[in-house]
Image (cartoon, rainbow, N blue to C red):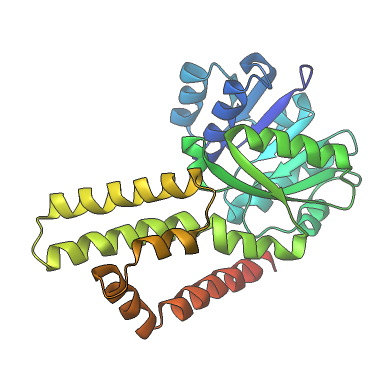
Amino acid sequence: MANIQLGFIGAGNMAEALARGILGAKLVEAGQMIASDPDQGRRDLFEDELKIPTTSDNRAVIEQASVIVIAVKPQVFDKALAPLGSLFGPKKLLISICAGLSTRHIEETVADGTRVVRAMPNTPMLAGRGMSAVCAGKNAKPADVAKAQRLLGAAGQVIRVPEDLMDAVTAVSGSGPAYFFYLTELLAAAGVKVGLSEDDARLLARVTFEGAAKLLAESAEGPHELRRRVTSPGGTTEAAIKTFESLGLAKIVAAAVEAARNRGREMGR
């Protein structure tokens, strides 16, 4: 990928995380990238910390780069890209990380023949531990998907799925970090309720989940087996797990994921 010219339309946190991963993996040099963003602060960060040239003009990115990552909010995609759609075409690979936007919608916004790959990363990409999924548009070649996977893989792991499952991916891994953070909040609040100080409860919850996640990542065993090992018959953990089960936690989680998936479908219409 030494000769690639990579552009970012949108220089927010996800674009930054991806750029840092790409630089760290030495896939593309900073001077071979360009990023656009309306916010001067974000442009300054890319230039000062990442040494990536920036502009406030999206047109300049499209004209200069052969691979363009679209990293804007879904609700501003049409406003940002529609006026410049004719600048795309068969020579351009467009990688969209806009949640909910289908490859069909993207292809209808840009010039015919544009090779589109849709991706759904998540915020742990900021820590180099992202989880992404990709799917191909009608004009994307296997090499285009492989290129997108390699770029995204610089900041985490990547899987390929059919597009009709992208909303499910969004519901599980795209929104998943928020579920984890929410559960951490709830566990800390519960600790305060049983007598711990707020500082101690937050520390206990955070470090416990951090350690458990690391253990899961490094273990050959799945979460079910790791949970079983902690859950002694008649012990404290079993009492907690039985309470979760009696209150229908499994149904709550399933319903929440389904709601997130359905909302993704609505956003894509």
Task: Look at 66% across and 44% down and name the residue there.
Answer: 158
Q: Nearer the viewer, residue 234 or 97?
A: 234
Q: Nearer the viewer, residue 140 or 224?
A: 224
Q: Is residue 68 left or right of residue 52?
A: right
Q: Is residue 230 visible?
A: yes
Q: Nearer the viewer, residue 213 or 219?
A: 219
- Image coordinates of residue 195 in percent, x first then y, are 8, 64
- Image coordinates of residue 28 in percent, x first then y, are 68, 20
Task: Look at 68% across and 65% down and name the residue there.
Answer: 268
- Image coordinates of residue 21 in percent, x first then y, are 57, 29
Q: Quadrant of residue 36?
A: top right
Q: Is residue 230 above or below residue 47?
A: below
Task: Look at 74% across and 56% down and name the residue there.
Answer: 161
Q: Is residue 221 above or below residue 16?
A: below
- The quadrant of the rendering that contains the C terminus is bottom right
Q: Nearer the viewer, residue 119 or 58?
A: 119
Q: Quadrant of residue 30?
A: top right
Q: Is residue 5 left or right of residue 244?
A: right
Q: Is residue 56 visible?
A: no
Q: Is residue 94 left or right of residue 25?
A: right
Task: Look at 39% across and 61% down and name the residue there.
Answer: 229
- The quadrant of the rendering that contains the N terminus is top right
